[in-house]
Image (cartoon, helix red, strand yellow):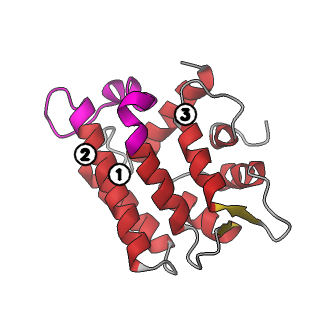
Amino acid sequence: MRTEATQRVELVFGLFDANGNGVIDIGDFDLMSKRVVEAAYDSDEDAKEAIRAAFRRYWVTLETELDSNGDGVVTREEFRGFVLSPERFGPTIGQFADALAALGDPDGDGLVERPLFVALMTAIGFGHANIDALFDAFEPTADDRIPVATWAEGIRDYYAPDKAGIPGDHLVGDPAS
């Protein structure tokens, strides 16, 4: 696994531990889902339900694949070997990527505007400077929008262990470096 991928794994674990108790559990996904849906106040109910379903599937996949002792939580150690395993996690990431990117397009024009992108990514837990660096890496249009498909593909790339130098790497570390 590339160094960049390892850094992404560590960041994702911290984000998924939304309540900060040191493990990932269903409560973390409920909290993240609630925050993301609240940030997408202009989105329709179908889009909101799609992201809720994606978060539920994410948790079920993690619990099924990683909770080796059946205690209802995923530890950092359990998490490390899995999240960047495309053969085990690809469909779950795909559903999440499509749902999140679509949530960012409430008017259905195929484009995500920066303010909503920032709101959704902030709701997940990413830092504002990193979010702006990521959005800029997606090469927005002159009116500061990115294609929904570009964002969805960027999410998929983020979870690919063999990728480096991708826009998602802006989410890890200092965006100025």
Q: CA distance from mark 3 to mark 1?
A: 19 Å
Q: Is residue 18 left or right of residue 115?
A: left
Q: Secondary structure at mark 1?
A: loop
Q: Which mark is residue 19?
A: 1
Q: Which mark is residue 60?
A: 2
Name the residue type under label 2.
Val
Q: Is residue 172 above or below residue 52?
A: above
- The total of numbered circles placed on residues is 3
149 is within the stretch colored magenta: no
Q: CA distance from mark 2 to mark 1?
A: 18 Å
Q: Please name whichever residue, 80 or 96, is drawn nearer the observer in this view of the structure.
A: 96
Q: Nearer the viewer, mark 3 or mark 1?
A: 3
Q: Is residue 174 left or right of residue 76?
A: right
Name the residue type under label 3.
Arg
Q: Which mark is residue 8?
A: 3
Q: Residue at x 42, y 65 (%)?
A: 35
Name the residue type under label 1.
Asn
71 is within the stretch colored magenta: yes
Q: CA distance from mark 2 to mark 3?
A: 21 Å
Which residues are drawn in magenta? Answer: 64-91
Disc 2 to disc 1: CB gap under 8 Å: no
Q: Secondary structure at mark 2?
A: helix
